[in-house]
Image: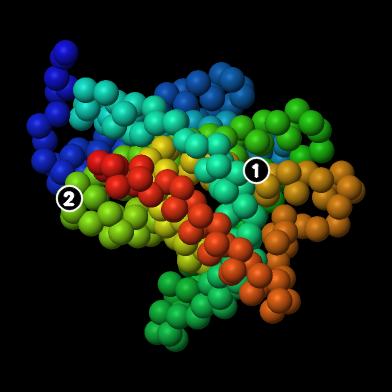
Amino acid sequence: MKIPLLHSLNPFSRIIFSILLIIICFFSIFMIGLLVALPLFDLSLTETMTMLSDFTSPKAISLLKYFQVVQEFGLFIIPPLLAALFFAVKPFHFLKLNNPSRWQSWILTIIIMTSTLPLINILIDLNEAMQLPEWLSGIESWMQETETKAMDLTEAFLSIDSWGEFIFNIVMIAMLPSIGEELLFRGLLQRLFNDWFKNIHFAIILAGFLFGAMHMQFFGILPRMVLGVLFGYLFYWSGSLWIPIFAHFLNNGVAVTISFMERQGWIVTRFQDFGYSTSLFLIFASIIISALALYVFWYITSSRAKQNTF
């Protein structure tokens, strides 16, 4: 069997190589995507770059969605797949894409993602209430501006009215990010961090922090970091990357679905408010159910976790 080119690299060197690979892939795929976009959207280079900051016109939104898909492949999907090819004899085994999961794990993942909604919404409120010291007011203003732009872009992407647009959004916002981001942060980085630090819990937290920071939405970094850590433990306990991919898909897919249903007039709940509650009873129930579901998940997958070689 042919030994991969970088099979013998130490963990730190693998991390450095992976970072360089991510940068190279991102810029290469972006440039290819840009060259394709010019004739595809019948735009000049100047028009294209200008429209990337326009969240109003339908053509600009279509262009932004196109580049969103390009980014998913260039930044998240292709780099970890290439890294696995360079590092491992069995790339799918390296990324834990070939491990089966018990059917109970899938059911429990649905319960966990549902029961933690009130807790995640509390974290969102806490994060949004964050204030920096007065001497960092300039940075805080920049963070708030970045947050506003990110929310405007999200609203623009979710402002859809047809089933075709809904299906495209499920692919663009739920399916591709869940696959790509889990490949990168859990499949590749969490494994490499554990190989380097020899501590799976630190590796999960570090990968979760980077997952939260990657979104560049500073007033939402805390709930995203917690979700990243949750996905990390689901990955570690189950031994299969498909479980955190599924959990991530549920998280994003619910937002797309609730937003679409609201625009159709079927419900009055906004996607930002879905799962939100100020009821102490519901919050307490959320904590109890989430803790029990996580314990049961750990219990039924504990034998696999002990055998995991991350």
Q: Position of residue 105 (x, y in %)?
A: 52, 43
Q: Is residue 219 visible?
A: yes
Amino acid on which disc 2 is placed: Trp
Which mark, residue 253? 1
Tell me residue 197's x, y (percent). 18, 55
Q: Is residue 228 visible to us here?
A: no
Instruction: Judge the density around disc 1: few (<14), some (14-19), many (≥20) Cα neighbours within 10 Å.
Output: many
Instruction: Please name the residue that numbered disc 2 is placed on.
Output: 196
The correct choice, above or below, for 201 with respect to 305 in the image is below
> Going 29% across and 32% down the picture, which residue do you hit?
94
Residue at image coords 56%, 48%: 109
Residue at the image position 42 percent from the left and 24 percent from the top: 32
Image quadrant holding the N terminus, namely: top left
Residue with the most extreme right position:
265
Q: Quadrant of residue 28?
A: top left
Mark linked to residue 184: none
Crowd tier of the residue under label 2, counting other residues whose Cα lies within 10 Å: few below 14, some 14–19, many 20 or above: some
Q: Secondary structure at mark 2?
A: helix
Marks 1 and 2, the one that precedes in the sequence: 2
Q: Position of residue 145 (x, y in %)?
A: 55, 64
